[in-house]
Amino acid sequence: MYCILVYDVGEKRVGKMLKHFRQYLNWIQNSVFEGELTKGQIEEMLGGAKRLMKKEEDSIILYSMQNDKYLEKKIYGVDKSELTSNFI
Amino acid sequence: MYCILVYDVGEKRVGKMLKHFRQYLNWIQNSVFEGELTKGQIEEMLGGAKRLMKKEEDSIILYSMQNDKYLEKKIYGVDKSELTSNFI
């Protein structure tokens, strides 16, 4: 499945969430991630995220599709994901 | 076209961007928007955003697809877009 994941969590949990999701997906921008995952990996990733999140405050949205064939992506301005990969 | 738009812009421009994109899309979470737009509307929206953004600092990503038939969306925790609409 091709996934786009966005999160909006309390400041205290931003770092942990970032670290968690980077294990599964590519960091794209701010609190946005992208990547190809199996259903098993998605379950594992969300299981971990649910343990880290405060359900009454935080929000995680997962968009998924069978593949990225129908998805068009355009970046305007800076491609922050490229900037990051240069530093790694 | 069904659109998911995410932005990561300098603090000074966040308010203006939010206001701009809300004219075209539904605010979903933090700096994430969603909605159905024609190609003409997309061009108009991006034209306005390009005037507001600092190209060397800011980043706007537009994901688009013909329709949302192939897109699955799951929300974990709070649905911030519902919370907002309650206040409007």
Image (cartoon, coloured by chain):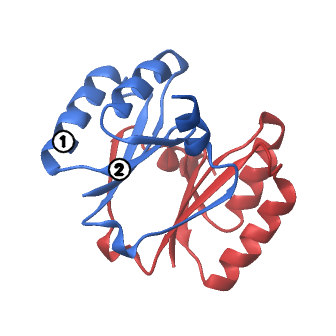
Chain colours: A red, B blue
Label 2 to label 1, Cα distance in Å?
11 Å
Instruction: Name the residue located 49 percent from the left edge and 23 percent from the top edge.
Output: B14
Figure quadrant of the N terminus of chain B: bottom left
Q: Is residue B34 visible?
A: yes
Number of other residues with Cα within 10 Å of mark 2, as a class: few under 14, some 14 to 19, many 20 or more: some
Label 2 in the same subunit as label 1: yes
Identify the disc placed on residue B75. Answer: none
Left or right of B74 on screen, residue B61:
left
- Coordinates of residue A12 in the picture (x, y in percent): 84, 37
Q: Pick out the residue farthest to the left.
A: B40
Which chain is indicated by disc 2? B
In this view, the residue in front, A80 or A20, is: A20
In the displayed structure, B55 sits above or below B64; it is above
User: Across the whole image, how many numbered discs are drawn on residues?
Assistant: 2
Residue hosting label 2: B35
| Circle 2 SS class | strand
Q: Is residue A30 visible?
A: no
**Residue A21 at what x, y percent from top left?**
70, 60
Give, as a three-letter code, the residue at label 2.
Gly
**Residue located 80% across and 52% down the image:** A55
Q: Looking at the image, is A36 positioned above or below residue B4?
A: below
Instruction: State which quadrant residue A60 falls in.
Output: bottom right
B16 above or below B1? above
Q: Earlier in the sequence, mark 2 or mark 1?
A: 2
The reply, left or right, for residue A15 in relation to residue B14 is right
The residue labelled by disc 1 is B41
